[in-house]
Image: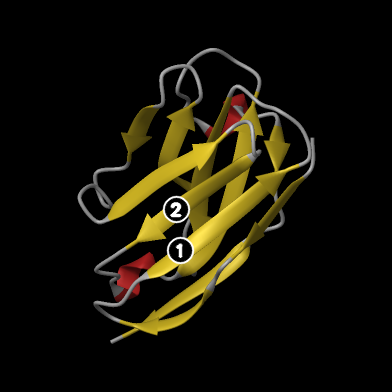
Amino acid sequence: VQLQASGGGSVQAGGSLRLSCVASGRTRGMGWFRRGPGKEREFVAAINWSGGITRYADSVKGRFTISGDNDKKLVYLQMNSLKPDDTAVYYCAAHLRLWVLIKSDEYDYWGQGTLVTVSS
């Protein structure tokens, strides 16, 4: 399965962006991770297609929403009330397991990343 992420860009603090990721095949679940400047990669949000269960990092709860459609092989990350700390390269990932996964090493496939820059 190949993943292609898009939608990154530059925005001022308080603004919004929507990231998209399209998969070349069906998966059991997808997620978004990010790596900020000088930081390690961290979990952002995940969704499992069995029941649409979602999980979020505490830092983005209430601001970010993950959604998508496995039939269309698409996942989105709607990001509102963006903060400078959200500046990072965002990666979509996918897996073939049954659960909602938040650990990067449990994901089977990774996209190339899309840069989000939030200015103050």
Q: Position of residue 114 (x, y in %)?
A: 61, 65
Give me the residue at 45% from left, 63% from top: 18
* Amino acid at pointer 1: Arg
Give the residue at mark 2.
77
Q: Quadrant of the C terminus?
A: bottom left
Q: Secondary structure at mark 2?
A: strand
Which numbered marker is on residue 83? Answer: none
Q: Is residue 28 visible?
A: yes
* Number of other residues with Cα within 10 Å of mark 2, as a class: few under 14, some 14 to 19, many 20 or more: many
Q: Residue furthest front?
A: 71
108 above or below 118? above
Q: Quadrant of the N terminus?
A: top right
111 above or below 35? above
Q: Secondary structure at mark 1?
A: strand
* Number of other residues with Cα within 10 Å of mark 1, as a class: few under 14, some 14 to 19, many 20 or more: some
Of pointers 2 and 1, the one earlier in the residue sequence: 1
Which numbered marker is on residue 18? Answer: 1
54 lies left or right of 116: left
Q: Position of residue 109 (x, y in %)?
A: 71, 36
Quarter location, residue 24: top right
Q: Position of residue 94 (x, y in %)?
A: 63, 34
Viewer-side residue, 2 vs 39: 2
State the CA–CA distance, disc 2 to disc 1. Answer: 6 Å
Q: Residue furthest top?
A: 98
Q: Position of residue 3 (x, y in %)?
A: 72, 46
* Amino acid at pointer 2: Leu
Give me the residue at 27% from left, 80% from top: 13
Q: Is residue 36 visible?
A: no
Colour theme: secondary structure
Q: Are marks 2 and 1 in contact (CB under 8 Å)?
A: yes
Q: Residue furthest left?
A: 62
Give me the residue at 44% from left, 53% from top: 77
